[in-house]
Amino acid sequence: MWNYEKRLEYPVNITRCNPKAAMVIMSQYGGPDGELGASLRYLSQRYSMKDRKVIGVLTDIGTEELAHLEMVATIIHQLTKDLSPEEIKASGFDKYYIDHTLGVWPQSAGGEPFSASQFQSTGDTITDLYEDMAAEQKARLTYDNILRIVKEPEIADPIRFLREREIVHFQRFGEALRRVQDSLDSRNFYAFNGQIDTKSC
C-alpha cells in the first residue's frame, strides 16, 4: 500500500538540546490533537466511506499524518538525545525521564498518555468529515501555540511546515464534504449511509 522512502517529508536538523521545547512539541506526537490520533482517525474512517474519492482523500492524508508523526518524533529525539542528568533535572524533563528515559512516547504536553478515545470513527460520512475538518483546525492551533513559545529557527522551521499542511488537509476535507453533500438531497440525506430513512421520520 505504501512506498516508504528513508527520508523525512521535510528536513529536521536540530543542533542544540532543548528539553523544554521537546515537552511542548510532544503534544503533537501523542496529544489530543496530535499526529498519532490524526493518522489513526483517517485510516480508520476510510472503511465506512461510500465515495471512492473520499476514501482516497482519507488514505492520502492518513498516510501523510504518519509522515508527520515521524517528523515530530525526530524533532523530540533531536531536542533530547544528548541531555545530561543535570540538564534533565534543571529543565523539568525529569518526570518524563523517570518513565521513558529519552525514548519518544505518545503523550500530551501536560503528561496525559495517548488514548484512542481522543478521536472518533462513527461510520457516518458527514459526521466524520466534520470531525476531520475540526481536527485539522485544532492541530493548526496547537502548532500556532508551539510557535508562540518556541522561537529557535531550526525548531520553528519544520513546525511551520507541519502547520501549513494542517491548513491544506482542512481544505481537502472541505472539498470532500462538499462532494458528498452535492450528491445528496432532502430525500436521501440521511439514507446515504443506509441507516435512517427520512420518509419514516
Image (cartoon, rainbow, N blue to C red):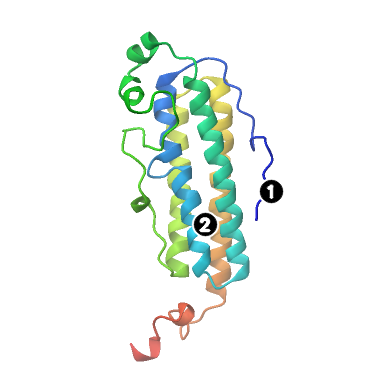
Label 2, secondary structure: give it. Answer: helix
> CA separation, marks 2 and 1?
16 Å
Crowding around mark 2 (Cα neighbors within 10 Å: few <14, some 14 to 19, many 20+) is some
> Which of 30/153 is in front?
30
Instruction: Tell which residue pokes out farthest to the bottom in this image.
Output: 200
Image coordinates of residue 132 in percent, x first then y, are: 47, 56
**The quarter of the displayed image where residue 86 is located:** top left
Q: Are marks 2 and 1 in contact (CB under 8 Å)?
A: no
Instruction: Tell which residue pokes out farthest to the top in this image.
Output: 86
Which quadrant is the N terminus positioned in?
Answer: bottom right
- Residue located at (41% from left, 34% from top): 105
Instruction: Kindly identify which residue carries mark 2.
Output: 43
Q: Amino acid at mark 2?
A: Leu
Instruction: Kindly identify which residue carries mark 1.
Output: 3
- Residue located at (49% from left, 19% from top): 81
Image coordinates of residue 90 in percent, x first then y, are: 34, 11
Q: Amino acid at mark 1?
A: Asn
- Residue located at (43% from left, 69% from top): 123
Labels 2 and 1: the sequence-earlier one: 1
Against 191, residue 169 (above or below) is: above
